[in-house]
Amino acid sequence: MERYPRRQVPVPIDVVAEILVRLPVKSLIRFQCVSKTWRSLILDPSFMHSHRRRSQQKPFLLIVENCWMGSDTFTIFSLTNEAMLEECCNSPKETLVEYFKSPDISSWDDAVVASSPDLLLFRKDIDDRRGRCFFLLNPSTGERLILPESPNSGDRCTLGLDYVPSIGRFKVARFFPSAKANARTQCEVLVVGVDRSWRPTKDYPFAVIHRLDQYSLLNGAIHMVSSSLPGGIAVFNLHREIWRMIQFPCGFCFRENRWAAEGHMDLRELTGSLYLSRFTPMKLEIWVLKDYENENWTMQYNIDTLQLFRMIWHDIECYTRVHPLMIKDDGKILIAVSTPSAVFHYDTEKKVFTALKYIPQPCVYVENYLPLN
Amino acid sequence: MASQDCEAAASSRAAAASSQDCEAAASSRAEKEEQKTVRVAASSRAKKKEQKTVRVAASSSRAEKEEQKEERRTVRVTSNDGEEFEMDEAVARGSVMLRHMMELGIALDGVTLPIVSGEILALAVSYLRFHRDYDDGGSGYGYGYSYGYHSESEDTALTNFDRDLVKQLDQATLLDLLAASNYMEIEGLLRLTCQTVAEKLKGKTTEEIRQTFCIQNDYPPEEEEEVREEISWALEEKSLD
């Protein structure tokens, strides 16, 4: 056991701050016991934000769906970085680390429906799926908050959330089809810890698709696919509560494929950009919105998927979705197929698919202990 | 009347004589002065020649030194217990505090650091010396490294040095070195020591931390109990407390 020689001179608090800002959240929570001064430093908002800023430099991945790991207790696993994702596909037990565990959350009834880099939003099914409620969870601190109820939390609703620095609070938005038969999308918002009930805000003149794989959070705005004419991506800015639309890339037409109208279209955020993909048995087109301001799309990959189709054709259904899971620096892609649940590695040079074991879509997470209340 | 004349004549004769003397004196003085001037001129000419030789000698040796790309100006830094360290200005610039003092011209007679001991200053100086040799593009060697060039082995050498520097230090010395690098504003050393201390802190108990940082527990017992309750979930993880 190491000796801890007693210091004669106390360490100045600004030096202590330099050390503490480098510690993980769990350690910081523990060290509140050391002294009142340490506690007030740790709980000081500007220290909290400095810590979060450092965390933002090293985000890591969380894997939430854990039925596939067969745990009895709800567990969230962490993965240091995207580079390990491939390794994780093959040997999850060796690469995943238990990050958060809770017997109060059910693997069966509770599912993640939205996330921001700081928080996860769960939907909890109650009463045999006849009812539902929603709650926020910060896996760093375990803090949970149940959101107020809303009559609009039916099956066809999308939720999104993000931290809004200018008000120092999290804000959640819910989107649902208009009750009137006018094919509009309505929206209500809630400032976490402040609002007791949902507040209606501007609606969007077209219908959007309420699917998890046609939604993403980017630049503080929630993006959803709108398939009705004129078609495009509906964008709701959470802070300013205004809508805009990003047009589909030229030549991107989802009507021509003979699958359902929602088709095999997938919208998600990867590597900080918006990715739109379209899958047919023949090919997988992957477009990236490189120039967000000017809405300039680039077709980054046009993959011949015949080989992939042959590998999965006996399991394929009209609900099968194929989308990119991760885009690596060297251009190689991990592609996920749901129903059946499978992950493939695609080598862009050799144009070859390799089957890997399944892994659920990870969320990007930044350690923080921003308060919910 | 005649005596008056006599007196006048005498006085004028005396005057004349004295003026003659004066003249003579003056002329001889002038002569002397002239000679003196000549002598002075000669000596000053000699001096100038001498100085010229010295100047020529100096500038040629300076040119030599410049060829070696080094104007070796140094700064002397003293610890609070009297230990002196002399380092090149380029090395000292690794400390933002010293750099500012040198720029303001207040480091010419040396700098004394009232809160840094000799043992700690030695560590800080060795850090500065090592990193200067690498971060400055190696101009001390004069082999024409371009700025910022690092070969593979040199990069490893850098982190090995850092690791070895902090490895054998005990907790108290590490904290002192951290405080010193904060005070002297040596960014790389501050990061290194903070990271090392942070790593060591992760597994410690509350009491061990209080000892290490010399902190008094200022919680009244009930409040401490409350806080422990609140954060019990985090305490469960490591069964240390």
Image (cartoon, rainbow, N blue to C red):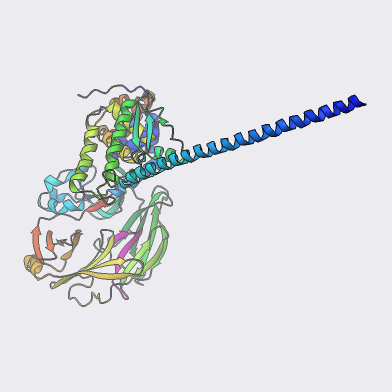
Percent of width and height locating residue B134: 26, 44
> Does residue A224 belong to the magenta stretch?
yes
Residue A141 visible in the shown view = no
> Does residue A335 belong to the magenta stretch?
no
Q: Closest to the observer: A189 or B37? A: B37
Examine the rendered structure and indicate whether residue A257 appears above or below residue A11: below
- Give the left or right position of residue A222, taking residue A306 as reference: right
Residue at the (33%, 69%) spot, across then down:
A295
Task: Magenta stretch: give its range.
Answer: A215-231
Percent of width and height locating residue B130: 27, 38
Q: Tell how many labels.
A: 0
Percent of width and height locating residue A9: 37, 24
Examine the rendered structure and indicate whether residue A62 appears above or below residue A270: above
Q: Closest to the observer: A218 or B158? A: B158
Q: Image quadrant of residue B220?
A: top left
Residue A365 visible in the shown view = yes
- Give the left or right position of residue A318, taking residue A275 as reference: left
The quarter of the rendered structure image containing the C terminus of chain A is top left
The quarter of the rendered structure image containing the N terminus of chain A is top left
